[in-house]
């Protein structure tokens, strides 16, 4: 009996120990769960706090977006009002400057951006000779952007109409390292020419840049050339510039040439040609674009032997490229020429090829080495044949003229022939491999 009672007590002790152990484990587990629950509650509270902060930030940003949108709408309204004001000023200014009884020969536009000192020099040069013919050649300054000094300078002249191109659309260059300026310039040109041709209804426009001076006979020259531009549709534009117009390479201010190479730098364009160019105007490098065969389509350009514009812009978008060698020594014509009395019909397409061929075939051909020395020892005109572009560049380098080609055409060339004065009044003709054949000249 005692043994049974002892065994029962031992079992109770084991049961009690087991119960106590289970209770302790339960307590420990409950404590762990309680700690985890507290951590979860704390995390939830933290997330809730962050969510509220995030919601507050979103609300703040939404408020800022609304404010910015309102500011944008306000600025757009102001911009619209400014455009209306500028258009009204242009209309009033143009009405004041144009004689209703005089049909303008061409509008003259000076393209400007951020060089107030250059613009002043250009405007003074133009007004010196434009004042007496203002009704024939109404003057405009078109500014790209809002440089305050340029705008102030342009508006200080009563003799011209101010235009402002405000373009806030971002510019994306197509190739790495390109200057954004060339894209902006192309946009500005299209805007200005569209305005002058389509809004102001001019039949011709002369384009100048804000770093040019003009010759005394600049306007007489373009008035005489306007008739050519109207009659001969094989002439794409008339230029006042000769790339090889440096003092040592020119002589006769009355001589004009046709060229397959677009010279630019003071040029006149007709509305009929702009109708064709405007819809496909390039994003950048508009001048080289005009030199492509696909755009000029075999049409040619009139250029003088002696320049009627002088480019003094050493600092600009082209970063002074070639300035010292090619631009600074340019000869600006200072000899009076009575263009009204001159017969320019020799420049018409059907007459010019024979006119030019007669001059070229009279020139004495020279070959071999020491071409400069040989040319110097000959009294009259000389022609030198080149075989290809590298050969031309070598010969041009010997004489010091422009070596550059664009789309297979040397600067100033007509039918592959580049002409310049050397031992004045001697003319040098650099003749391409098939130039004489194109002119119908027998090289025997």
Image (cartoon, rainbow, N blue to C red):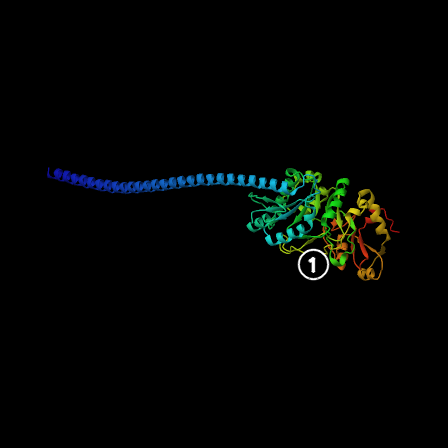
Residue 189: percent from left, percent from top = 64, 44
Q: In the rendered view, tell whether residue 357 sits above or below residue 426.
A: above
Residue 17: percent from left, percent from top = 19, 41
Q: Nearer the viewer, residue 21 or 369?
A: 369
Q: Residue at x 13, y 37 (%)?
A: 4
**In this figure, what is the number of numbered marks?**
1
Q: Residue furthest right?
A: 444
Q: Nearer the viewer, residue 411 or 348?
A: 348
Residue 198 shows up from this direction = yes
Residue 434 shows up from this direction = no
Does residue 28 appear to the left or right of 47 in the view shown?
left
Residue at the spot of label 1: 325
Q: In the rendered view, tell whether residue 36 sits above or below residue 332.
A: above
Does residue 215 appear to the left or right of 58 in the view shown?
right
Q: Residues within 10 Å of mark 1 (few under 14, many from 20)?
A: few
What SS does tag 1 mark? helix
Q: Quadrant of the N terminus?
A: top left
Q: Nearer the viewer, residue 331 or 366?
A: 331
Q: Nearer the viewer, residue 140 or 312?
A: 140
Q: Residue furthest left?
A: 2
Residue 319: percent from left, percent from top = 63, 55
Residue 271: percent from left, percent from top = 69, 39
């Amino acid at each position: 009996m005692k043994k049974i009672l002892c065994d029962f007590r031992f079992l109770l002790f084991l049961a009690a120990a087991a119960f106590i152990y289970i209770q302790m484990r339960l307590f420990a587990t409950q404590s762990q769960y309680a700690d985890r629950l507290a951590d979860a509650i704390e995390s939830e509270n933290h997330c809730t706090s962050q969510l509220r902060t995030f919601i507050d930030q979103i609300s703040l940003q939404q408020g800022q977006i609304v404010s910015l949108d309102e500011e944008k709408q306000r600025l757009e309204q102001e911009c619209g009002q400014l455009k209306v004001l500028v258009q009204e000023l242009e209309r009033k200014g143009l009405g004041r400057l144009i004689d209703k009884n005089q049909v303008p020969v061409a509008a003259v536009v000076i393209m400007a951006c951020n060089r107030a000192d250059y613009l002043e020099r250009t405007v003074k040069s133009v007004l010196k000779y434009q004042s007496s013919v203002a009704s024939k050649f109404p003057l405009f300054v078109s500014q790209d952007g809002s440089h305050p000094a340029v705008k102030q300078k342009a508006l200080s002249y009563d003799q011209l109409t101010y235009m402002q191109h405000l373009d806030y659309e971002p510019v994306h260059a197509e190739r790495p390292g390109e200057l954004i300026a060339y894209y902006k310039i192309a946009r500005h040109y299209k805007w200005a020419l569209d305005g002058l041709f389509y809004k102001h209804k001019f039949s011709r426009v002369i384009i100048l840049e804000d770093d040019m001076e003009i010759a005394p006979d600049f306007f007489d020259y373009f008035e005489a050339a306007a008739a050519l531009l109207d009659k001969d549709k094989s002439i794409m534009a008339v230029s006042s510039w000769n790339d090889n117009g440096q003092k040592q390479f020119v002589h006769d201010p009355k001589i004009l040439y046709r060229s397959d190479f677009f010279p630019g730098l003071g040029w006149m364009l007709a509305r009929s040609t702009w109708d064709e160019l405007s819809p496909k105007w390039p994003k950048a490098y508009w001048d080289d674009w005009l030199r492509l065969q696909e755009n000029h389509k075999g049409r040619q350009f009139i250029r003088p032997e002696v320049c009627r514009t002088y480019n003094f812009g050493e600092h600009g978008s082209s970063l002074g490229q070639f300035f010292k060698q090619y631009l600074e020594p340019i000869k600006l014509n200072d000899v009076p020429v009575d263009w009204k009395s001159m017969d320019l019909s020799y420049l018409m397409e059907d007459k010019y090829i024979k006119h030019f061929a007669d001059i070229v075939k009279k020139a004495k051909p020279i070959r071999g080495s020491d071409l400069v020395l040989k040319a110097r020892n000959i009294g009259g005109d000389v022609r030198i044949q080149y075989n290809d572009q590298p050969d031309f560049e070598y010969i041009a380098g010997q004489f010091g003229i422009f070596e550059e080609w664009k789309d297979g055409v040397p600067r100033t060339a007509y039918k592959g022939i580049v002409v310049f004065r050397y031992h004045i009044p001697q003319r040098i003709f650099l003749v391409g491999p098939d130039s004489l054949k194109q002119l119908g000249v027998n090289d025997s």
